[in-house]
Amino acid sequence: MSLQCPIGPEANILEPSARQVHRLWLKNPVVSIADLEVFKQVNHRNWSSHVIDITFPVESGIEGFIKKLQEICDEANEAASTNQIIILSDRLASKERIPISSLLALGATHHHLIETRKRMKVALIAESAEAREL
């Protein structure tokens, strides 16, 4: 078993080309804050990244939660057209803003991009204070 993670757009495996090896490989799926900042500023091979806020206002309640989850998917779909890395971030969480579970946001985005046929074109990264060792 390996914890290595490829980052970046994936070329068609049925059509061998040099683009297949143009990905970054992480030794493990957890990166430092400094490394995450590098992904936010990336310009490797003319790649770009887009950060999506996965928090919503407390006062919007359940309706706000559902609406924000759809907005995250729509924003990711739009960002996938021009960016190679999408970062889902709960960094703006506060007393006034509730973070959506990073696992839920990541899963919803992943499946939405599969449905729109853009998933293989982007890397998804979760920036979350939710992840921790138990």
Image: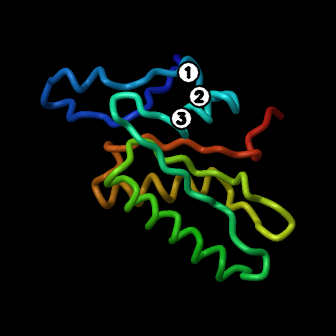
Relative vertical location of residue 54 with respect to residue 125 in this rendering, above or below: below
Residue at 44% over, 27% down:
6
What amino acid is found at the position of numbered circle 1 in the picture?
Leu
Q: Which residue is mark 2?
A: 29
Q: Nearer the viewer, mark 1 or mark 3?
A: 3
Figure quadrant of the C terminus: top right
Q: 132 and 82: which one is in front?
A: 82
| Mark 2 to mark 3 CA distance (whole Å) | 13 Å
Give the label on residue 39, or none: 3
What amino acid is found at the position of numbered circle 3 in the picture?
Phe
Q: Is residue 15 left or right of residue 109?
A: left
Q: Tell whether label 3 touches label 1 (CB within 8 Å).
A: no
Number of numbered discs present? Answer: 3
Residue at 34% over, 34% down:
46
| Mark 1 to mark 3 CA distance (whole Å) | 19 Å
Q: Quadrant of residue 59?
A: bottom right
Dot 1: element: loop
How dense is the environment of label 3, judged by Cα within 10 Å: few (below 14), some, or many (20 and up)? many
Q: Which residue is mark 1?
A: 3
Q: Is residue 42 left or right of residue 68?
A: left
Q: Nearer the viewer, mark 1 or mark 2?
A: 2
Give the label on residue 85, or none: none
Residue at 28% over, 54% down:
117
Q: 110 and 60: which one is in front?
A: 60
What amino acid is found at the position of numbered circle 2 in the picture?
Pro
Q: Quadrant of residue 78?
A: bottom left
Q: Position of residue 10 (x, y in %)?
A: 30, 34
Mark closest to the chain's N terminus, 2 or 3: 2
Mark closest to the chain's N terminus, 1 or 2: 1
Q: Tell whether label 2 touches label 1 (CB within 8 Å).
A: yes
How dense is the environment of label 1, judged by Cα within 10 Å: few (below 14), some, or many (20 and up)? few
